[in-house]
Each structure stands twice: as C-alpha cells, then as structure tokens.
Image (cartoon, coloured by chain):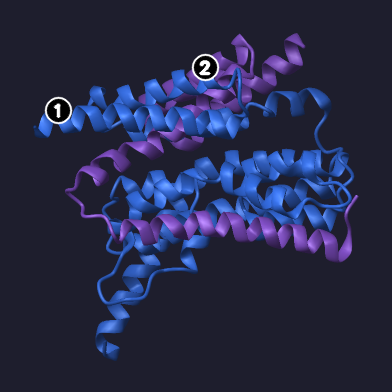
Chain colours: A purple, B blue
Amino acid sequence: MPEGGAALAGIAVMALATYLTRIAGYFLGSRIAADSLAARVLDVLPGAALAGVLALALAAVDLADRFAVLAAVGVYLWRRHTLLAIATGLLLAVGRAHLFA
Amino acid sequence: MNGAEEQPAAAAARASFVAGFRATLGLAVAGGVFGILFGIIALARGFEPDTAVLMSAAVFAGSAQVAVLELWQEPLPYAGLFLAALLVCSRHVLMGVTLHDTLARPGRRPPLGRLFVLTDANFVLTSRKPAVPDRLAFFFGSGVAMYTFWVGGTLLGVLAPALLDARTLAGLGIGGALYIAVLLAIYFERRRPAALLAPALSAGVTLLAARWVDASLAIMAGVAAAALAVLVVEVARRA
C-alpha cells in the first residue's frame, strides 16, 4: 500500500485533475455567447450526465432499493424538503436491510 | 468600491453564503453518509486513516475517489490516477460552462478559489437562480456545506469503522443513488416535461453502453447522444 511521499503525490495528481475539471468549464463558458446554438446544447448536458449517473446507480441495486429512491423523490416532490426526502430514502433502505436481509 | 459600499456588499455576501449552506443541508447529509462509507471502504482496502481523510479534503470528489481505490497499489500509476479522476469528474466541465453567466462578475477576476467546491449539489441549487443578492456567495456556501459533511463523514468513517453494523452499511449503500435522484428532482422540477427527453435518452444510452465499456465512458456516450439529439432539434427549429 502506497505511503508517505508516494501517497501524497497520488493525492496531488488526483486533486489537480479534479480541480482542472472544476475550472475548465468556467473558462469555456466565458467564450460561449448565451444565445448561441452551442449554449443551448451545452445547457442540457449536465442534466443528461446526472441522468446517466443515476441510471447506472439504479441498475446496480435491487428492486427494494429502487423503491426507496422512488419514495425519496416522491417525498421531495410532495414536501419540497430535501432533508426529509433523503432521510426517508435512507430509513427505508436501512430498515429493509435490518428486517429482510 | 469605497468603505460605505463595501459593508452592504459584505452583508449581502454573508447572507447569501448562509442561505447556500442552509439550502444544501439535506443533500450534504447524503454526502456525509457517502463520506462515512468511503472512509470505511478505504480503511478496509488498507489505506492509512490520515491518507483517506487527506484525499477527501484535497480531492473532494466521492465518485473519483471510489473509482481509484482499485488503482491504489504500489507502485502508484500516476497517469492512470489522473485520467481516472479526469474522466469521472468530466461532468464538472459541463456544469462550469452552464454556471459561468451566473457566477461571473464583470470586471472581477474568475473565482478560482471558490470553484474548488463545485459539486453536483451546488451546481443544481445555483443553476435554479436562487433569490439571493450574491449568487457566487450562495454557490460557495452550498459547496462549503458539501465539503464539511464529506470530509467530516470520511473522518467519522476512518475513526469509527465499527460504528455501523454490516446491515446498516448495506442499507446506507443506497446513499449515492438517493443523492443523485433527489438532485435531479430539484433540477427538473421547474422545467417543461419536454426537458426530460434529453436526460431520458442519456440514461438509456448510458445503460446500453455500460454493457461494453466502463461507467465513465458509458456516461460520456449517453451525454453525446443527448447532445446530438438536442443539436438536431435546435438546428431544425432555427432553420
């Protein structure tokens, strides 16, 4: 297992890569006119990326856990309360793991 | 800016920062749970506790950190770590492009320090254009909430790995999916139903592509399909 300087260098390399992704878009955005075709297309892409992440996450869990996620979204849309929605989903998933595992 | 103007601006920034922090608490709890899981998994893979916490503090990207656990062996493949982090976090680039007009201040330098806390959560909450006087401060407050819970969660995970039993851990494994699902609900709640078509296409193509390529590339394929579809529709609409 890497330790000391090697581990620090590994963390530094990862930190640099993630930071570059965080600032690159800001600089690209400064070069794109708000009403351009590129802006219109780029506007929908973050939501599309998040939808891809969610699709893979849901594909990796079973039906009961998908129900917990659906319940959390339902609670959010009903009460517009993020903490309540997250807590509902976590309680359902943890409760199910204890009761039926 | 003179002293008299600075005071209201500073007060507006403080209020906006606090509003961003508060608005993010629910999502930050999910981030904290994910942080606990990361700490426990990293410890189980042989990480030193301080290495895991330092990684969370310096990298602050849960999905990238989990993705590189497999690569974290002697000798470290630095180029592989760099590319893996770049690929997994590539959606930040799209978010930065979209947020530019909301965060930019004419005549001021780019907020390079505050962009360190760009995450899915503060992207979604800030892109809703909250009614605050200083949206950059709101964005930063939201990111600081995510950072605090993420690093705090990792710390808790490595200090008390036995705090949670195996069944609770298995249940909490749903945290990542919950976080993204609620984020998407927030992101799309005020948009037209037609706005759901591109993400639905992206999700379908991602699932299909994941049969042949790894997760990061599958997500890119989904995003590319959505981009192509929107481009075709927009070109037809403008013709």
- Which of the two residues, A72 or A2, is positioned nearer the viewer here? A2
Element carrying mark 2 = helix
Place residue B187 in its image quadrant.
top left
Q: For residue B236, which numbered disc appears in the image?
A: 1
In the rendered image, residue B228, in percent from the top left (x then y), is placed at 32, 30
Query: Height in image: B86 above or below B191?
Result: below
Q: Residues within 10 Å of mark 1 (few under 14, many from 20)?
A: few
Check chain identity for marks 1 and 2: say if they share one: yes
Q: Taking B225 as reference, is B208 left or right?
A: right
Residue under the point 56% across and 28% down? B177
Place residue B236 in its image quadrant.
top left
Q: Taking B226 as reference, is B116 left or right?
A: right
Q: For residue B208, which numbered disc appears in the image?
A: 2
Q: Please tell me which of labels 1 and 2 falls first in the chain.
A: 2
Q: Taking A100 as reference, is B91 left or right?
A: left
Quadrant (top left, top right, bottom left, bottom right) of the N terminus of chain B? bottom left
Residue under the point 68% across and 29% down? B172
Q: CA distance from mark 1 to mark 2?
A: 27 Å
